[in-house]
Image (tube, coloured by chain):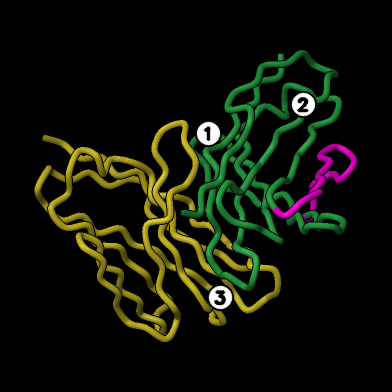
Amino acid sequence: GAVVSQHPSRVICKSGTSVKIECRSLDFQATTMFWYRQFPKKSLMLMATSNEGSKATYEQGVEKDKFLINHASLTLSTLTVTSAHPEDSSFYICSAVLAGGGETQYFGPGTRLLVL
Amino acid sequence: GEDVEQSLFLSVREGDSSVINCTYTDSSSTYLYWYKQEPGAGLQLLTYIFSNMDMKQDQRLTVLLNKKDKHLSLRIADTQTGDSAIYFCAEKGTGGGNKLTFGTGTQLKVEL
């Protein structure tokens, strides 16, 4: 149980285009999902907290107009990297917390984004 | 803000025990977690411990928590080559929203 998927797993795009990454909780409902960014050989950096039916809460230094988050249902959150640039290339990982007050975050497999 | 530190690298022989250490600064931590990340993959939850516990054992994994020293360790008994990965500790404070602060990660290499 508690499986989280991400789509796509890898994406290569041209500079200036927008890329949407989906995060789905497959066998549970998640009122809260998190989006992280991980640089090579580095730890995870929390970008934002996504709450179903409300606006996302962004961490300091993360541009909300650059990284658009939509949490339209209890099983789906999307992260859109708008007007992507090479410095946005990274590994993006989402996690989900069980609805009903669970403490544990369950992580997706990650999405590798390469902007040329 | 909160800070979580780990040693960057650990090498052990197959069959030996591995001990991965983690220190944190947030004295209000409620839960502490250990996650495993294999190359190119997301994070797999291995185990967690509530802050009022000293030890938790789950098959080959033993977690020790010294709350006074803010020190957490993960012991892997009979380490196998499949245990080679990066291990992250993470702590959850009392702030709202289930936010986690992750350590820097320890790369475990298991040699034959």
Q: Which numbered circle lies on residue B109?
A: none
* Cβ atoms under marks 3 and 1 closer than 8 Å: no
Q: Residue furthest right?
A: A65
Circles 2 and 3, Cβ within 8 Å, touching? The answer is no
Q: Is residue B106 above or below residue B95?
A: above
| Residue B90: % across, % down | 49, 62
Between disc 2 and disc 1, the foreground one is: 2
Question: Which mark identifies residue A19?
Answer: 2
Q: Quadrant of residue B11?
A: top left
Give me the chain that's yellow.
Answer: B
**Mark sitting on residue A40:** 1
Instruction: Return the chain for callout 2.
Output: A
Q: Amino acid at mark 2?
A: Val
Where does the magenta region start and end? A59-74
Task: Name the residue carrying label 3.
Answer: B26
N-terminal of the pair, mark 2 or mark 1, is 2
Q: Amino acid at mark 1?
A: Pro
